[in-house]
Image (cartoon, helix red, strand yellow):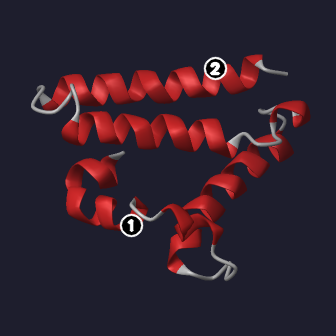
């Protein structure tokens, strides 16, 4: 979310194309954020923090929560709110996504 809030123009450019994440080339720059997220989730499974049964498809609710929050902060109802309030809400969003993954096993 920090990237989106600090660089809204680049955020919009990077994520405004629906096909960007389905590129056949796994080394394409557009594939890198998804690769990082899936690697982090896989590492959580490997460390025992995330139950194996909660891993399949976990990247999508995580991505959706963060991406959706960024859009709300940049051009939605959170736009213009004090930065501290936005960050507090961002942390709560991430905490809720994590809690949902851990509870879903």
Secondary structure, mark 1, is helix
The x, y position of residue 25, in whole percent, is 67, 83
Precedes in sequence: disc 2 or disc 1: 1
Q: Nearer the viewer, residue 16 or 63?
A: 16
Residue position marked by numbered label 2 in the rendering: 99
Q: Which mark is residue 62?
A: none
Q: Which quadrant would residue 33 be assigned to in this image? A: bottom right
**Residue located farthest toward the right when viewing the structure as drawn:** 53
Residue position marked by numbered label 1 in the rendering: 14
The x, y position of residue 28, in whole percent, is 57, 81
Secondary structure, mark 2, is helix
- Residue at 53% x, 69% y: name it: 20
* Residue 39 drawn above or below residue 102: below
Which quarter shows the N terminus?
A: top left
Horizontal side, residue 43 vs residue 35: left or right: right
Horizontal side, residue 99 vs residue 51: left or right: left
Horizontal side, residue 53 vs residue 50: left or right: right
Q: Is residue 7 visible?
A: no
- Residue at 58% x, 27% y: name it: 97
């Amino acid at each position: 979310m920090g990237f989106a809030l600090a660089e809204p123009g680049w955020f919009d450019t990077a994520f405004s194309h629906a096909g960007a994440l389905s590129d056949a080339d796994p080394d394409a720059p557009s594939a890198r954020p998804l690769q990082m997220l899936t690697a982090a989730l896989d590492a959580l499974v490997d460390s025992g923090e995330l139950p194996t049964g909660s891993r399949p498809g976990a990247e999508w609710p995580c991505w959706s929560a963060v991406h959706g929050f960024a859009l709300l902060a940049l051009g939605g109802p959170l736009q213009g709110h004090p930065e501290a309030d936005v960050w507090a809400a961002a942390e709560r969003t991430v905490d809720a996504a994590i809690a949902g993954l851990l509870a879903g096993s």
